[in-house]
Amino acid sequence: MVFRCFAALAAVGCAVLAAQEAPHAFVGARIIPIDAPVIERGTLLVRAGRIVAVGPTAEVRVPDDAVTVDAAGRTIMPGLICSHSHIGAVAGADSSGPIQPEVRALDSINPLDPGIQKAQAGGITTVNVMPGSGHLLSGQTIYLKLRDGRTVDELAIKLPDGSLAGGIKMANGTNPQRDPPFAGTRGKAAALVRAQFHRAREYQAKIAAAAGDPSKLPERNLGLEALVDVLEQKRVVHHHTHRQDDILTVLRLQQEFGFRLVLHHVSEGWMVAEQIAAAKVPCSVIVIDSPGGKLEAAHLSLATGGILDRAGVLVGFHTDDGITDSRLFLRSAALAVRAGMDRDKALQALTIANARMLDLQDRIGTLTVGKDADFVVLSGDPFSVYTRVLQTWVEGKKVFDFADPKDRVYAMGGYGASDGQAMSMCCFATQEGQ
């Protein structure tokens, strides 16, 4: 049934130009801009990778040279943003030490990993790819656009100064507890982190005192350089944490050293929602709907997103792929709505809220004129169990089409769907420290 009803959109694929010289107009769709009311019968006009118009079909003028797509009966919303993912077979720090800020996710991502295509099949257009949580600090994260590329450089998001966008991954709780030189207790874990940040402050002070004189500069230390970026709020700390006491420990460290912070997972975040809100720290929440896993997540609740939102916390959702499947990302927000979260806030948690956590809100997260043309075409309401992702577009280029058998295998599974895929073991101590 899906194949027949989507034939009109599929036929347009052959007309898509490599650089999209012609504008594309998606006409008659139900459009969810996120930053504006839903448009029941609207038109989305994109050109050269950007959104150039969005509004009621009767009010949007479609240029004569536009490729017009009949999207009646479809829903269009911004591309989904996953603020915590491990796709691309990412691997970070190793077993040589618990804190390794010099390690970069950039240097370990396989852009041909099928997990990337599966994320596209789930409507995800931007991800924060992170090393695992088996360390107190496992390395630098990288923000990727899920373009069709053969090198990680083709996927990496670049900042205006040409540098790569990304944060730094930290963790506490049981995951990084191991034999020395790792911490064996929660108290020792916090002590090791605190000591390393003090070393970074000293390194920062020596650089400032050198005033640009090469002879006075300290010996270069790539790890301390990365932590100075954190102290100077150039790089956001993405912090894995579950238990309420672990959450408060992270907030204590953040207050002491003044770094920018996003709390991830927060299984017991509902217990300390007021403290998180008072600290003005965003939360990237994982939604797990089945029992099992680790003891420190035993009190995880589907209501966490709604409780945090009502307390005044900026809330996003994430997949932690492969802990949850990128193809089911919409389901995470739907379950939160079932547990009491406001529907509009749940939609924001998949889009603009995560964009803000990645400092990309000016480029992505809403269907706004001037932003990147990242959007997903759905067969129905985003939170219906019957809805399918039909197409995913990144910067005006189609990267997933359910009507294409080569793409459909990533959405549905089948022979070859996982060939070459490697799961990053984010929660266990392996040879690579993941």
Image (spheres, rainbow, N blue to C red):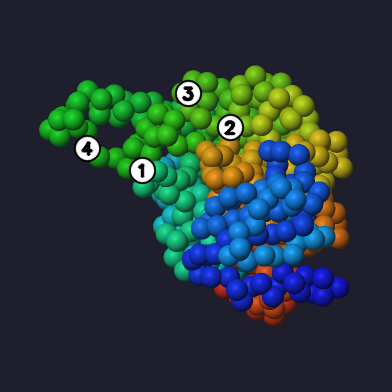
User: Which of the pair 255/147 is nearer the observer?
Assistant: 147
Q: Position of residue 264 (x, y in %)?
A: 63, 39
> Which circle, 1 or 3, is nearer the viewer?
1
Give the residue type at disc 1.
Answer: Asp
Q: Position of residue 7 (x, y in %)?
A: 76, 74
Looking at the image, tell me whether mark 1 or mark 3 is earlier in sequence order.
1
Give the residue type at disc 4.
Answer: Glu
The residue sitting at 42% across, 45% down in the picture is: 159
Which residue does the numbered mark 1 point to in the structure image?
A: 161
The residue sitting at 42% across, 59% down in the picture is: 153
* Quarter that holds the N terminus: bottom right
Looking at the image, tell me whether mark 3 or mark 2 is earlier in sequence order.
2
Instruction: Give yes or no for contact between labels 1 and 2 (Cβ–Cβ under 8 Å).
Output: no
Q: Which label belongs to residue 219?
A: 4
> Which circle, 2 or 4, is nearer the viewer?
4
Looking at the image, tell me whether mark 4 or mark 3 is earlier in sequence order.
4
Q: Position of residue 112 (x, y in %)?
A: 52, 69
> Which circle, 4 or 3, is nearer the viewer?
3
Looking at the image, tell me whether mark 1 or mark 2 is earlier in sequence order.
1
Which residue does the numbered mark 3 point to in the structure image?
A: 258
Instruction: Give yes or no for contact between labels 4 and 3 (Cβ–Cβ under 8 Å).
Output: no
Mark 1 vs mark 3, CA separation in Å:
24 Å
Which residue does the numbered mark 2 point to in the structure image?
A: 186
Q: Position of residue 164 (x, y in %)?
A: 41, 48
Residue 409 visible from this viewpoint: no
